[in-house]
């Protein structure tokens, strides 16, 4: 009778993410997806990922809900002080400081 030992180097490699996109890429593409601005091939990869990833699917639905609740503002509809406050609040966001 033989016993099988688990050997770490014999593990199967991690499955590739759905659609070939990792979650952070999906998050970066959500706005373009919702604006119907993704190239067709990227849209297919995005939708494939969303179909196979519960977390990204939930994130997309949260973004859709936010848009429904908040609506759409044109730049000239935004109060100048509110614009300054928002810009100030998010000035370091892209740098990862927030």
Image: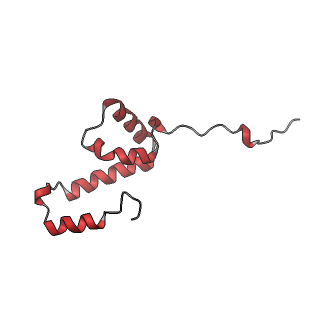
From the viewer's perspective, tell me whether residue 8 is left or right of residue 76: right
From the viewer's perspective, tell me whether residue 79 is left or right of residue 10: left
Give percent across and percent down for residue 30: 33, 46
Quarter of the rendering containing residue 91: bottom left
Give percent across and percent down for residue 35: 24, 43
**Vertical order, 41 against 24 (above or below):** above
Total tally of numbered discs in the picture: 0
Work out whether residue 59 or residue 22 is closer to the camera in this orientation and state it: 22
Q: Residue at x 47, y 36 (%)?
A: 20
Q: Residue furthest right?
A: 1
Give percent across and percent down for residue 74: 13, 54
From the viewer's perspective, tell me whether residue 31 is left or right of residue 25: left
Give percent across and percent down for residue 39: 30, 33
Question: What colour-coding does the image apply?
Answer: secondary structure
Q: Residue at x 26, y 38 (%)?
A: 37
Q: Quadrant of the N terminus?
A: top right
């Amino acid at each position: 009778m033989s016993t099988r030992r688990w050997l770490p180097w014999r593990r199967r490699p991690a499955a590739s993410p759905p659609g070939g996109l990792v979650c952070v890429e999906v998050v970066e593409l959500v706005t373009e997806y919702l604006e119907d601005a993704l190239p067709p091939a990227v849209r297919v990869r995005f939708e494939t990922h969303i179909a196979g990833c519960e977390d990204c699917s939930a994130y997309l639905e949260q973004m859709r809900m936010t848009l429904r609740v908040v609506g759409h503002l044109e730049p000239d509809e935004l109060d100048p002080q509110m614009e300054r406050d928002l810009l100030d609040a998010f000035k370091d966001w892209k740098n990862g400081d927030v």
